[in-house]
Each structure stands twice: as C-alpha cells, then as structure tokens.
Image (cartoon, grey):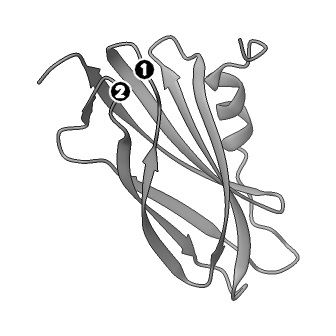
Amino acid sequence: SNGGISVSDSITKVVISQRSQDRGALFDVMISLPEEKSILRGERLTFATTLYNIGRGGKTDVELVYIVSDNKGNIIYVENENRVVETQDTFVKNLDLGDLRPGSHKLFVELLYSNLTAVASDEFTVLLFR
C-alpha cells in the first residue's frame, strides 16, 4: 500500500501552476504514447517526453515524476528523475511497470521546478494478448 495517496491528491497540487518570479523560468511538458496506446501485460511502457523551457532561465535543473494510476485512481507506480533543460529536451522513456492488471491505466508526468509544476497525462491499456 502507498498510504492511501490517490491521483486526485496530486492533481490538486499540479493545477496550481505558477510562474516562478525569481528566475523568469516557465516550463511545459508533453508526452506522446505509441499510437495504439496499449502494452501487453509485463511489457515496458515506452513513450516520448518533451520538456520545454520557455522562460529565460537558460540551463535549468528540473525534477520529473512519472506516475501510473489504475482506473480507480490508485497510484501503482512512481519514479523520479532529474534532468537539465536549456530550451527543449525530447527523449524516450521506458517504465518497467511489472505485472499490471489488464485494463485502462493513466500515465502522469510532472515537471517540478522551484514553485512551478507542469503536468502531462494520457491513458493506456494493458492487454493480456494482442
């Protein structure tokens, strides 16, 4: 158990996204799942992530949080990563989600910097067979 943290708790936090006054930094994050938006049970989830530094901050360290929830909103996977973004950074991410139950799931990617949070999300399906 993860102490009863649900995705709605983290969404409440991420909608309060604001410009960081100090450095003029402003960020956005986008994710792009494969077209079929599905994986076989036990497969890794692979997707492209693009980070945009659209402020005037120059090279900036940001924290990324990858969150996967089930269709009831329970968080079943969390991974953190630090990256440096100058203007734009696109990379492929693989999440080893283990043995997820078949059905629909949601992926959230949060970008955290100072007092600013940007979030992207999309849904994907875990299949027993194709």
The label on residue 42 is 2
Tell me whether circle 2 and circle 1 mark residues in contact (CB < 8 Å).
yes
Q: Secondary structure at mark 1?
A: loop
Image quarter where the C terminus lies is top left
Expressed as whole percent of the image width and height from the top left, the position of residue 119 reads 57, 49
Q: Is residue 93 left or right of residue 39?
A: right
80 in relation to 108, above or below? below
Q: Residues within 10 Å of mark 1 (few under 14, many from 20)?
A: few
Residue for badge 1? 99
23 in relation to 98, above or below? below
How far apart marks 2 and 1 lie (CA) works out to: 5 Å
97 in relation to 111, above or below? above
Expressed as whole percent of the image width and height from the top left, the position of residue 48 reads 37, 58
In the foreground, 21 or 95: 95
User: Disc 2 or 1, which lies upstream in sequence?
Assistant: 2
In the foreground, 44 or 31: 44
Q: Residue at x 80, y 68 (%)?
A: 20
Q: Residue at x 50, y 11 (%)?
A: 72
Expressed as whole percent of the image width and height from the top left, the position of residue 9 reads 71, 25
Q: Residue at x 58, y 30 (%)?
A: 77
Q: Residues within 10 Å of mark 2 (few under 14, many from 20)?
A: some
Q: Quadrant of residue 122?
A: top left
In the foreground, 125 or 122: 125
Amino acid type of the residue tagged 1 in the rendering: Asp
